[in-house]
Image (cartoon, rainbow, N blue to C red):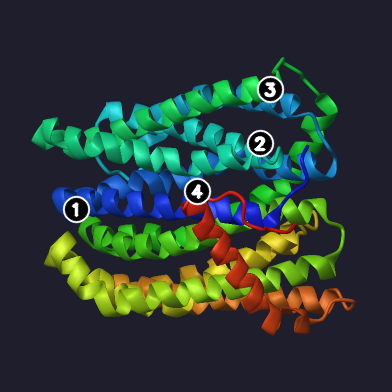
Amino acid sequence: MSEINLKKNISFTTVAQAITMLTAFVVNWFLARFLGPDLRGRYVYLFTVNSVVWMLFDLGVSKSFMYSLQREKADPRALYSLTLVTFGVSILVSLLIFGFFSDSILGGAEYHPVVIIALALYIAMFLMHNRQKVISIGMNEIKDYSLQLMLPSILFMVLILPLFWTFKQSFRMESSFLLYALTMFIVISIFHVRIVKQTSFKFIWDKVLIKSSYIMGFRAFLSEYMLIMMTRVDMLILKHLSSFADLGVYALAINFVDIINVTSNMIGIVILNKFAALNDDNASLEILRKVFVLMIMFNVVCIVGMAVLGPFVINFMYTNEYIGAYKAFMYMVPAIFGLTLGSLFNTFLWSKGFPVFTIVAPFIATAIKSLISYLIIPIYGYNGAAISSSIVYPLWFLILLVWYFTTHKESKIGSLITRKEDFIDLYQIVQSVFNKIRGNNESNIYQ
């Protein structure tokens, strides 16, 4: 396995993420404008359900894969063998669960049976896609990982823009979701062939590795599951207390935040891979400090752009039915900094073996957010949901910082204070990204 070149990996994945963000923006604009708030709310709710359910099938094993590949030098063929078995089992279990409990899971919303079956299959495919991505980055196949980030959005955009108009008008929301499920199937099929070829795959059933993956993964699962609940519980409560139309408007504001946060998550995966290969907290904190600078500057650019252009863009591209999403987004400015920086610091903690407090902190935050949401959503609607996020996400980040630096006396919070050399490194990263965009692979990028 080749040496991890952090700047090279960040530059590749940053380019990939920029392309993904652009295509996702086009697709979300298109569907929001031509489905309308109510149907888009129903469409988005399917993905919200997926974000909650797929992790129950994964049990955090995806996160343990990277640790196993980097720290324990596990055989990727054994990990992919487990992935294939899990994929088959998750299809059967998902179909059974949605066959008997779809009304309860979907909150009584009326979805066509074909959409419910597609959702059951999509959950299993999404799980497969995530494990394939982790195996690629764990093997330091950064180009494959970058393609896996981009392809679902790109392929769906290429298909949905012309095909949307051929869908039966009364079935366009459902057809759009079915097309996305088909897109995910195509992507996982492509990278199944790639991983089989790269690893000279043969089926290996390593019981010791499987046991350790689930033991470690379960802690990661609880941590990540609570993070998902922390970021999505307001949408579930809003849907319960309000309407699909309100959910559709709020989902647009959340989509803008998610576009920013997905960059944090993308960088998080890259540095988790690097941190897993290190055994030096101070060195990890130094890397994290530099990444914080990059993330803060990215956040500021995105927020200023939205503040200046948001009303015009939303009104022109999404119609005035969605204009409330601008105000909701602006209420979430503190949430953006809390969520992105907290996610990166949480990744650093995960690299220490998924400590229990990474479960406790988001659990506390989710409980607080649920309480605040139930109190203020009936008064302020989706703006109340946005306000709850801006209170809770920075609080979650603060809780993580206090816990770590009070329990690890050898580390100092001053390690995260920005320094002059961080801006020099930031310039080199940005320069490297532009070199990649221009196709210049001869830039100097150090490890």
* Amino acid type for the residue under numbered disc 2: Ile
Q: Which residue is mark 3?
A: 81
Q: Which mark is residue 234?
A: none
Tell me if mark 3 has few (under 14), some (14-19) or many (20+) residues whose alpha carbon lies within 10 angstroms of its own.
some
> Who comes first in sequence, dot 4 or dot 2?
2
Q: Is residue 374 left or right of residue 77?
A: left
Tell which tag, 3 or 4, sits nearer the viewer: 4
Tell which tag, 4 or 2, sits nearer the viewer: 4
Could you tell me which secondary element the residue under label 1 belongs to?
A: helix
Q: Which mark is residue 439?
A: 4
Do the CB atoms of the residues marked 2 and 3 lie less than 8 Å apart?
Answer: no
Q: Position of residue 20 (x, y in %)?
A: 41, 49
Tell me if mark 2 has few (under 14), some (14-19) or many (20+) residues whose alpha carbon lies within 10 angstroms of its own.
many
Tell me if mark 4 has few (under 14), some (14-19) or many (20+) residues whose alpha carbon lies within 10 angstroms of its own.
few
Do the CB atoms of the residues marked 3 and 4 lie less than 8 Å apart?
Answer: no
Q: Which residue is mark 2?
A: 135
Whether residue 364 is visible to the viewer of this picture, yes or no, is no
Tell which tag, 3 or 1, sits nearer the viewer: 3
In space, the residues marked 2 and 3 are separated at their CA atoms by 11 Å
Residue at 39 percent of width and 45 percent of height: 47
In space, the residues marked 3 and 1 are separated at their CA atoms by 42 Å
Tell which tag, 1 or 2, sits nearer the viewer: 2
* Amino acid type for the residue under numbered disc 3: Ser
Q: Position of residue 289 (x, y in %)?
A: 69, 74
Do the CB atoms of the residues marked 1 and 2 lie less than 8 Å apart?
Answer: no
Q: Quadrant of the N terminus?
A: top right
